[in-house]
Amino acid sequence: MAIFTQGVLTKKGQALIAKCEASGDGISITKVKTGSGVHNNVSAETLEQFTALIHEEQSFGISDLATIEGNNGVAVITAVLNNRGLTQLYYLNELGVYAEDPDEGEILYLLLVTETNSMYMPPENSSGISTITERIYVEVTNAQRTTINYDGAVVSATEFIALRQIVNSVIQHLTGGTAGQMLYKTGSEDYAYEWDDSNVITDSYANFPEEGRSDAVYIDRDSSEIYVWKVINSGTGEMGYFKLPLGAEASQTLQSQITTNANNIAALTTKLHETVVTVTANGWVQGTQDDEVIFTNEITVSGMTSNVALNVYPVTQADTIQGIEAEKKAANMFCGRGIAESATGKIVLTIPKKKPAVDFGLGFTGV
């Protein structure tokens, strides 16, 4: 059932499209907000002048972004509305799509309204979690270069669709299998995997199963010694773990490989370490780059090196509603337009034209 009966691209949204067409940049969609404001007998011309909802109730991230084949001027965004944390019922009379303007910050880009109280969002405590999935067609300059801000991580439509296809392919090949099986590569194609019983089991000798398998080889990770499960007493038929004789050179090679693998795992764990920093408003330094005003902020991070692939996302540190909203706005401004680069002992943040006005938290993985 359609909730909204009228939709307009606001004047600020129209201005943003003009800016992006002139600069060649894509449009960054940041979030949607819902409200209970009443819009009776309001003309499209009046709605175009709106810069905010009449009565904002909730804010949601964008969960999906898609393009329409043959129509590069329209993107389809999906927002999953829910009543998590909602304490009072309200009628879903207005929905705003917000975007990042390079000069003004976050703006009301698109406004959808209804004149009747046709759909309401119940409080969580009365009915549990309720959701409404809303697909919205958004006019843009270039759908392929349109981005969404998904929990602070900016991704283009092309990247989002490609990532979704990869995830679906991986899930398809990972589905199935039974306990004890291993995934192995079956060909040179991407994601060509199958589940198979593991014939090589590596663990501490004390953790070997009480009864082994005759078709498997067991490696003691502590000593690198190799065992098989076989008859160890021909007179009684007793089965047990038999240690295979292994030459000194082969044993040393195996131990070296095990050590290398352990070091690689430790290095990977370090790369996935999370670092959270506070980006201070007074830490931004104005400069120029290619005749354009930029602001930089250098943050000391112990152990950081150059050329590290960083994943950046906002971390809320404020503890008041006003503080959280201000911090989210500052973080979204940076995540929508800024870049983070690693250097020796520090992270360098750069944002063009306008700097965030308040302190905000950022998280990094890849340190």
Image (cartoon, grey):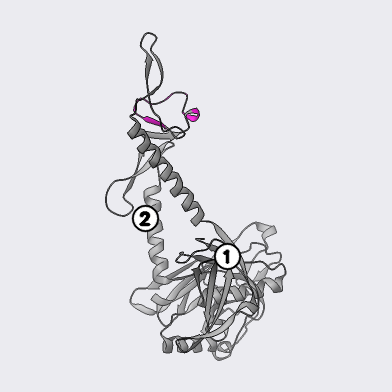
Residue occupied by mark 1:
301
- Give the amino acid type for the residue marked by disc 1 in the picture: Val
Count neighbours of disc 1 (C-alpha within 10 A) and say few if under 14, some if 14 to 19, many if 20 or more: some
Residue at image point 33% right, 77% down = 70
Between 288 and 102, the one nearer to me in the picture:
288
State the CA–CA distance, disc 2 to disc 1: 37 Å
The magenta stretch spans residue 354: no
Q: Identify the image quadrant of residue 57.
A: bottom right
Q: Secondary structure at mark 2?
A: helix
Check if mark 2's residue and mark 1's residue have beta carbons within 8 Å.
no
Chief secondary structure of the magenta portion: loop
Mark number, residue 115? none
**Residue extending farthest right:** 320
278 with respect to 204 (left or right): right
Q: Can residue 342 be seen from the camera position used here?
A: yes
137 with respect to 118 (left or right): left
Range covered by the magenta-colored residues: 206-219
Residue at image point 51% right, 54% down = 270
Residue occupied by mark 2:
169
Q: Can residue 355 be seen from the camera position used here?
A: no
- Give the amino acid type for the residue marked by disc 2 in the picture: Ser
Between 58 and 367, the one nearer to me in the picture:
367
